[in-house]
């Protein structure tokens, strides 16, 4: 085919039994929904086709009432190999591993520019790719451990990204993922504390800060400021609660 050329193919209904499953997979890929779970593959005709349900109503209708389809292809552009950015599922394991560092670098650039949405997208995609690579290894083996450690800087950067973006619960979750792998990580303890302060989870924030102070004496001044802030917020919360109860019961007697 030439660029801007259009071709069409008419396919008989009896030849279309794999089409609903293939179409669903391609649609999900286009929506970046790669983790919806694998679909069952059926290699018989009518009986097998009725044993499962698609996510898309038009595909369900096609399964129930098979009919011939016309496929039309319009060639818009031809990409050379060096110009094409493959999707994650198309990469070999070594290529996928190399792409993690590139995504992290790209995320860092967006983070420095203050573009937290695009930064978080890069970090999350890198984390997703590591997850798929971990599935190839046995948990606890040296290869699995080394690979899992690559999650730490990504979750750290993601927690900072979410803090700056004021997505505090997400920041807490990202910092917690770091602490699952490195329970005394200095940056993760501080960022989780900051996130917890922002959502008024003050007692847990205080626990994080005291742990930080014990493990990293050099952070004492920074921790002191945050602990004083927590005490101020606790007093504010108690005063607010006291006023609320006062208004609730002022007319009781």
Image: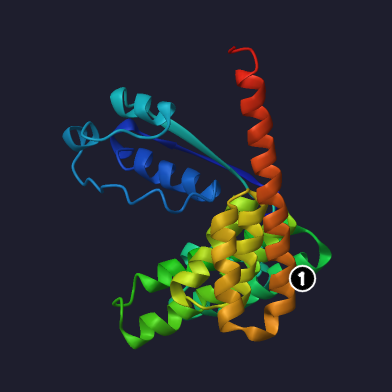
Q: Residue at x 48, y 78 (%)?
A: 182
Q: What is the quadrant of residue 7 in the picture?
A: top right
**Quick one: 218 or 252, which is closer to the camera?**
252
Residue 40: image location, x then y, percent: 26, 47
Q: Residues within 10 Å of mark 1 (few under 14, many from 20)?
A: some
Residue 163: image location, x then y, percent: 69, 58
Q: Residue at x 60, y 19 (%)?
A: 249
Horizontal arrangement in the rendering, residue 119 relative to residue 1 (left or right): right
In this view, the residue farthest toward the right is 113
Horizontal arrangement in the rendering, residue 171 relative to residue 92 (left or right): right
Residue 186: image location, x then y, percent: 60, 78
Residue 144, compared with residue 250, is above or below; it is: below
Q: Residue at x 63, y 74 (%)?
A: 187
Q: What is the quadrant of residue 77 in the picture?
A: bottom right
Which residue, given by chain and number where applicable, does mark 1 sit on? 109
**Quick one: 63 or 226, which is closer to the camera?**
226
Q: Residue at x 43, y 67 (%)?
A: 131
Looking at the image, can residue 100 be seen? no
Looking at the image, can residue 178 be seen? yes
Residue 110, compared with residue 231, is above or below; it is: below
> Considering the image in quadrants, where does the N terminus appear?
bottom right
**Quick one: 152 or 110, which is closer to the camera?**
152
> Considering the image in quadrants, where does the C terminus appear?
top right
Residue 31, compared with residue 107, is above or below; it is: above
Horizontal arrangement in the rendering, residue 136 relative to residue 238 (left or right): left
Secondary structure beneath label 1? helix
Horizontal arrangement in the rendering, residue 203 relative to residue 43 (left or right): right
- Count every numbered label the image shows and give the total: 1
Q: What is the quadrant of residue 185 in the picture?
A: bottom right
Residue 171: image location, x then y, percent: 61, 58
């Amino acid at each position: 085919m030439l660029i801007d050329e259009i071709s069409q193919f008419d396919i008989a209904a009896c030849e279309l039994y794999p089409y609903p499953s293939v179409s669903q997979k391609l649609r999900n890929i286009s929506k970046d929904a790669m983790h919806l779970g694998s679909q069952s593959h059926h290699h018989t005709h009518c009986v097998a086709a009725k044993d499962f349900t698609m996510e898309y109503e038009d595909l369900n209708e096609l399964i129930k009432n098979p009919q011939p389809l016309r496929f039309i292809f319009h060639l818009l552009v031809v990409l050379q190999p060096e110009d094409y950015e493959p999707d994650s599922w198309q990469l070999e394991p070594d290529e996928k591993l190399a792409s993690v560092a590139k995504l992290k670098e790209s995320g860092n650039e967006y983070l420095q520019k203050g573009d937290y949405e695009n930064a978080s997208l890069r970090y999350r995609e890198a984390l997703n790719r590591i997850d798929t690579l971990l599935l190839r290894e046995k948990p606890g083996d040296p290869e699995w451990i080394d690979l899992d450690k690559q999650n730490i800087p990504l979750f750290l950067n993601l927690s900072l990204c979410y803090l700056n973006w004021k997505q505090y619960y997400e920041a807490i979750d990202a910092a917690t993922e770091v602490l699952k792998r490195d329970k005394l990580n200095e940056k993760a303890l501080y960022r989780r504390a900051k996130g917890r302060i922002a959502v008024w989870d003050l007692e847990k924030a205080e626990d994080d800060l005291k742990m930080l102070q014990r493990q990293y004496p050099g952070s004492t001044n920074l921790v002191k400021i945050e602990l004083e802030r927590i005490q101020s917020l606790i007093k504010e919360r108690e005063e607010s609660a006291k006023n609320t109860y006062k208004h609730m019961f002022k007319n009781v007697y």
